[in-house]
Amino acid sequence: MSGEHASRQLIDDYARGDATMAADTVWALEAHLETCAPCRSHLAACVATEAPGIAALLDTVRAGLEPQLDAAVRAPSRRVRPRWVAAWLTPAMAPWLVMTVVVTLMALLLDAVASPSFFGDISPVLAIAPVLPLCGVAASWSSGLDPAHELTASTARAGLPLLLRRTTAVLVVVLPGLLVGGWLTGTMTAAQWLLPSLAFTSTALALGSVVGVTRAATGLAVAWGVLVVVPASVTGHVPLVLRLVLQTDQLPVWGLLLALGIGAVIARRNAYSTL
């Protein structure tokens, strides 16, 4: 890359399918081509001269598809979403975010009508707050829930950057809801759940580089439910794990877990493009 455009030699090598090009160089070039019309024009010219076989294949495919496309019935026009919406959100996330909001509202309702001994005098909102963002994170990079996952995963900007944008979108929706819930119940402060929530999120992303983000987020949420939420609702006593979350002197531990999770995500950043 040189200046604002890719070098001609680099584009020529890319058009020929040079197998010796480094993976990060290919990624950077493809990301640049998305936004640079002059370089795309040069690439089109290079394909015709440097890779005539590809040009002939494209012409053959185009000739075969044109009659079918001309005969196809045009679909009704749909409202075009702004580009930033597609960059930060996926259609599969919408029902998950709605579900997360509904779970928060149900916890608020339970907090208002439950008996004092229920959850061991602990707000149900506080019991689920640390893992609530995981519901949306589980859907942020799910191949089973996103019908366009294969197409998205093949783009140059897929991988960790896209995953972080979608995770941020989840946190922007969930965290304000928890803040409002804590204010309405008056039983918890942001210091009690914010760091644990962020620590769980970073841990899910870190484990996701090995087992997949959806599996990691779902596994952590289920483990928290089995170890904390279910025992608290059945016995009426606060589990030891939840007591550790409530104690403000444990915040440095959660801060350390958050830092370790972020460090693992950075160290494994190249693995997310192959999920």
Image (spheres, rainbow, N blue to C red):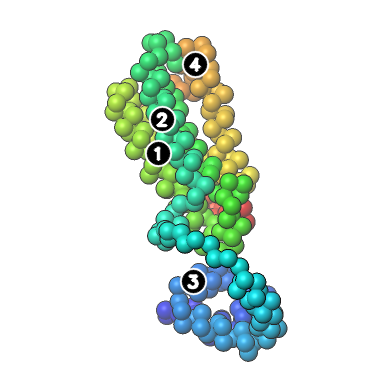
Q: CA distance from mark 4 to mark 2?
A: 16 Å
Helix, strand or loop at disc 2?
Answer: helix
Residue 233, disc: 4
Choose between 92 and 2: the one closer to the eye: 92
Choose between 129 and 113: the one closer to the eye: 113
Q: CA distance from mark 4 to mark 1?
A: 23 Å
Residue 34, disc: 3
Q: Position of residue 76 (x, y in %)?
A: 49, 61
Choose between 113 and 78: the one closer to the eye: 78
Determine contact: label 1, label 2, CB under 8 Å: yes
Tag 1 residue? 174
Q: Amino acid type of disc 3?
A: Glu
Q: Residues within 10 Å of mark 3 (few under 14, many from 20)?
A: few
Tag 2 residue? 104
Q: Nearer the viewer, mark 4 or mark 2?
A: 2
Residue 27, disc: none
Picture residue at 57% right of the left edge, 36% below the top: 218
Q: Which is nearer the N-term, disc 4 or disc 1?
A: 1
Q: Which is nearer the N-term, disc 2 or disc 3?
A: 3
Q: Residues within 10 Å of mark 1 (few under 14, many from 20)?
A: many
